[in-house]
Image (tube, helix red, strand yellow):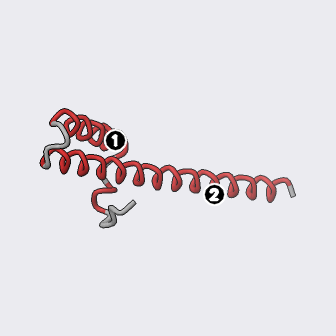
Amino acid sequence: MAGFLDRAKEQAQRGLNQGKQKIDEVQAQRTGGDLLKKLGAAYYAQQHGTGTPQATQQALQALEAHIATNGDAFLHSGDHRG
């Protein structure tokens, strides 16, 4: 009986770990999408005279830092609407 409970506990823990990993991936994708949107907005503002090159550069650096940490999978998801 103890072996069964140990296996059940192990499976439950594995499921929790997989769930947490998926949540982390979704959150990283959402954050990446938000940063991409901010870069687009900064660039648009710069091109229309209401933004600055510095704001665009800061947005780009934030996006690049996120990619360095989390990868660029969000760029390939095809849905950047957030």
User: Which of the 4 quarters of the picture holds residue 33?
Assistant: bottom left
Q: Position of residue 32 (x, y in %)?
A: 35, 49
Q: Which mark is residue 66?
A: 1
Q: Quadrant of the C terminus?
A: bottom left
Residue drawn 33% across the image and 56% down it: 74
Q: Residue furthest right?
A: 1
Q: Position of residue 41 (x, y in %)?
A: 25, 50
Residue drawn 23% across the image and 45% down it: 42
Residue drawn 46% across the image and 53% down it: 25
Residue drawn 63% across the image and 54% down it: 14
Residue toward you, 26 or 18 = 26
User: Which of the 4 quarters of the picture holds residue 18?
Assistant: bottom right
Q: Quadrant of the N terminus?
A: bottom right
User: Which of the 4 quarters of the picture holds residue 49?
Assistant: top left
Classify 10 Å Cα crowding around label 2: few (below 14), some (14-19), many (20 and above).
few
Classify 10 Å Cα crowding around label 1: few (below 14), some (14-19), many (20 and above).
some
Residue type marked 2: Gly
Q: Which mark is residue 15?
A: 2
Of tags 1 and 2, the one toward the viewer is: 1
Q: Secondary structure at mark 2?
A: helix
72 on left or right of 26: left
Q: Position of residue 44 (x, y in %)?
A: 19, 51
Residue type marked 1: His
